[in-house]
Amino acid sequence: MVKKEFPTVHFYDQDFVDLYEQTWAWVRDYWREPTDGTGENPFGVRFFVDPQETRINQFDAVFSTFFLVYSNRLYPVSNQLDGFYNRQEENGAIRSDYNLETGEPLFSPENPQGVAPPLFAWAEYNLYHKVGNKKRIKEIMPVLERHYQWLEETFKDETGMYHVPLAATGMVNAPREEAYYPVDFNTQQAMNSSFMAELGHVLNDKDIEFRYRRQYFSLKTRINQQMWDEESGFYYDLNKEQQRVGVKTAASFWTLLTDIPNEVRSSSMIEHLKDPAGFATENPFPTVAVSEPSFSENGEGYRGSVFPPYTFMIIKGLEKQHQWELAREYAIRHLYCMLDTLHPEGNKRGNVYEAYRPNREGKASWTGNPAFPRAMHLPSVGLSTVALMIENVIGLLVSLPRKTVRWVVPTLEIMGIENLNLRRNTITILSKKSGRGWEIRHESEKLYYFTLDLLDQGKEKTLPIPSGKCSMLVDKM
C-alpha cells in the first residue's frame, strides 16, 4: 500500500479511494532514465513513461503533468516538459515523438513535420498555480515563444488559420479525412495564445501579454466566424475550400476550454454532451457523436472510444463554463466505468486502459490494431483517477501564488483531502457530520485563504485559515 507521502483522499465510495491510491503505487515503476549508446541522457532528465515504450510522446507527457502535480513534490513533474524543451531545434521546432534511447525525433509520412497539439503554455500555467514557481516561467518563456513562432511560420497560411495533417491532432483514424483546418488544432493554438498572455501577465511583461492576447482574439474571431454552424449549434473542421465538414467529433469541445463560444453557443455545445444521439454515452465521452455513421460501440480507435485525456479536457471545459455539477457527474460516471473494467464480473481479469467502450464496461478495440488499447497507460489513466478525483469529484481548486484553496461542493458529503503539499505548507480539509451538524475541519502549517462554495445551498464564503487546527460549522457560515 502507498505510504502517506502522497495526499490521502476521503470519499464515501472506498473503491474510488483505492483506485486513487493504487495509481500512485503504479506510478513508482514508470520513471525512466533514458541513455544513448555512450551512456549519456539525450534529454537531460528522467521521464514518467510506460516501461514498454521506446518513444516519448509530447501529448502524453503534457497531459501527465496535470495529475503528477499532486505527488507532493516527490516526483519532478516539470521533467515531462523540460525533456522536450531540451530537444528544441534552432528554428523553434519541438517534435511530437522522440526515440527514448537516442533522443532523435521520430517522423511519419502522415505527420512529416512531427507537430503535436500546442499545449505547453496550458500545462505551464497549471504548473505555476499548483507549484508556485514564478522563476520557472521566466526561464521557459523564450522556449515557448520560439515554439510559438515555429508553429506560426510553418502551419499558419494566408487565411489566418492553421493547417496541419489529421495525424498531428492525435485522432489518427477519426472520420475527419476532409479536415484541412482542424477545429481542435486551431482552438488549441488560440488557447496557447491565451495562456502565453497569462504567463506574460505573471511576469508583468505587458508586451508579451498584449501580443498574445491579440493573437488569441484574432483566432477566436476566425473560429467563430468560419467553424460555427448555427443550424446544428456546433463547431466543425474546415476543408481546403474553408467549408465546414459536418462531422461531430470530440475535437470541437476544446472550444469550451478556450472560451471560444459566447453563452448561447456554449449552452448549445453543452446540450450535445447531454444528447444520447450526441455524446451522452454511459462512459463519457466518445470521440465521435453516436449519430455519426462511423460511430462504433466497440470504439474502433477514434470512432467512438472514450479516451481519458479527451474526457478530462471536456470536463475542464465544463468547469470553465461554470457547469460544476455536470462536470462532477460526468467525472463520477467515467470513474465508475473504469472501475467496472478493472473489476469485471465473473472470473475475468480486469485492468485500466488508454481507451474504453462508450456504452458498456470493457476496453475499446480497433480492428487490425491488436496493440490497442494499451493496458496500464498511466499518463492518461492518472488524469481520471487522480486529477479528476481531486479537482472534480472532491472539488478542490488550488492556486499557490494566490495562497487560495477553493472547495466547490455540489452537496455536502463525507469527503476531503489530507496531507496536500502546497510548497511550504501542508493542509488537510475534511467535511464531516457531527452532533452540531456539518463541519469543515482544517489543519495547516501556514495561513492560507479558503473558499467554500456550496452549490446546492447557494452559499459561498472566503475565510483566512490560520496555522494549526480549526473547524467551521457550515450552518454558521
Image (spheres, grey):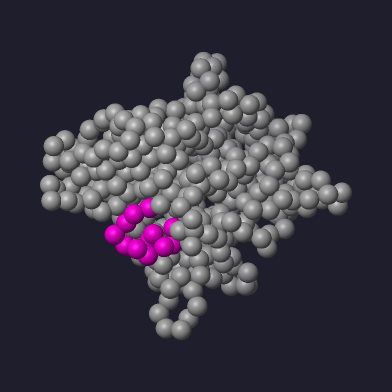
Residue 355 locus on image (x, y percent): 51, 63
Q: Which of 248 and 119 is in front in this view?
A: 119
Q: Residue at x 19, y 51 (%)?
A: 433
Q: Farthest residue in the right direction?
A: 38
Relative placement, left or right, of 226 versus 173 is left
Residue appearing at x 29%, y 28% in the figure? 464
Q: Position of residue 199 (x, y in %)?
A: 52, 26
Q: In which quarter of the image is the C terminus?
A: top left
Residue 43 picture location, percent across and down: 73, 43
- 241 or 159: which is nearer to us? 159
Residue 187 sits inside the magenta stretch: no
Q: Which residue is drawn at 66% across and 60% down?
A: 51
Instruction: Judge whether 55 appears above or below 118 on screen.
Output: below
Q: Nearer the viewer, residue 360 or 376?
A: 376
* Picture residue at 56% right of the left edge, 64% below the top: 376
x then y, percent, for residue 282: 35, 65
Residue 11 is covered by the magenta coloring: yes
Tell me if residue 260 can be seen. no
Q: Give, as a single range, the part of the protein colored magenta.
A: 9-20
